[in-house]
Image (tube, rainbow, N blue to C red):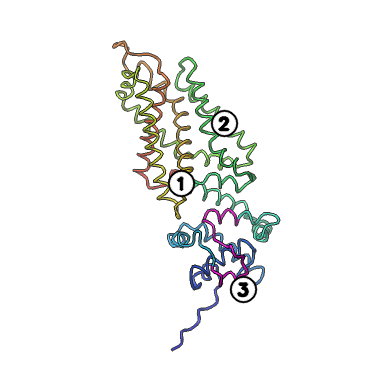
Amino acid sequence: MPVAEPPPAETTREYFAQCDDWDRVAAVLCLVLEQGTIPKDFPQGEKWTFEFKLGLLRLAVSPTSGAEIQWEALEGKKVSEKQRDRCGLPDEARLPSREAYVEDFWRSTEDGGANTDLREWLVDRWGAFQAYERHLFGWFVRRFNLPAALRLGAMKRAWASYVVPWIFPVVAILMSWAILSLPPAPTFMGLLWAAVGMVLLNVLLWVFLDLRLAQILELFIPRLGGTVAIGYLFLAAAPQLVGLLFRWGERWRLQLLLAGGLLLVLFLYVMQHIARRVVPQPRTRSLVLRAATVTAIGVGHAAVGLVMFAPLLFSKEFLDLVSEGLYAPPRAHQLILCGAIALAIGVILELAWEDKPLTEPL
């Protein structure tokens, strides 16, 4: 008995479900990206072209396990000669990585790109262009790809997109060093100075990057800041541990070595966290860079936390070491080790208690 032909596909999902093999899927993805045309065996017309391209974008960022498996099988796949001839693709046609495809596809909607018509539809007929751009920004952030998230907007230079995420940790460390170098102040003054510094940094990024405040806060990974606060609260509940740092006051090499070891372990832990969360898994170079960026932002949060918590953790009343004649103003290596402990404890507790990415919005 002859097998009935499936009904014509009317959605992008249905079309790909009817494709014969991965090679055909890769060819269609390359066709839309490079030439801005949809396959001929899909209904034609302006409406159908828009529906197909928008459906393709939605599938590309779909969080379902089926979509992730498909992209893992497709990543880097070279289109066969048969499919290249069928779709009119060049000889070197090859499907990029999932994230590179989404970024290139969105860039192709700009003026002069192959898919400008999709942007025109989203702007003129739906008025939803900004909503999709914000969604893609958050999608890249949740995949720990902060440079790609920045390149969606006005930032076109690749090197700048890699530098900007490091501005926060650098500014936070310098600000903390400057404030903690001043005479001891009450905790609320540290909180005030930290708040002022962060507001100024937000204003500068808002002016120069043309990003919304919510997007700037996403770049700072606020969940990571919450984990650091948990770490400092743990230290506040264990004054004996902080007091031990004073008893090791002259062992600065040991304390710096411990701090470096904690940060290295944390970096490897974050790298494993990213490798498990991001599908398909990034290549080694990208994985290392993303883990280093997240760890650096965590160090920035730890530095800001020191401004707020150090006056309490290293106070005479909290440590109760005056009677032993051991109290002295905290030294730099003691502060560094304290911050590293808070960061490590906070991140480990956060990931152990809650099965969410560190970049997930609060």
Percent x, y for residue 50?
A: 63, 65
Looking at numbered disc 2 in the image, what kind of residue is underneath it? Val
- Tell me which numbered mark, 1 or 2, is placed earlier along the sequence: 2
Task: Determine which residue is flagged by label 1.
Answer: 287
Q: Residues within 10 Å of mark 2 (few under 14, many from 20)?
A: few
Percent x, y for residue 5?
A: 50, 81
**Span highlighted in magenta in the image:** 80-105
Work out whether 278 lies above or below 220: below
Percent x, y for residue 279?
A: 45, 54
Q: Which of 164 and 352 lies nearest the eye of the viewer?
A: 164
3 or 1: mark nearer the eye: 1
Q: Quadrant of residue 11?
A: bottom right
Looking at numbered disc 1 in the image, what kind of residue is underneath it? Leu
Mark number for residue 199? 2
Work out whether 146 lies above or below 78: above
Mark number for residue 40? 3
Q: Residues within 10 Å of mark 1 (few under 14, many from 20)?
A: many
Work out whether 332 lies above or below 154: above
**Residue in the image at 45% along x and 59% along y:** 72
| Quadrant including the N terminus | bottom left
1 or 2: mark nearer the eye: 1
2 or 3: mark nearer the eye: 3
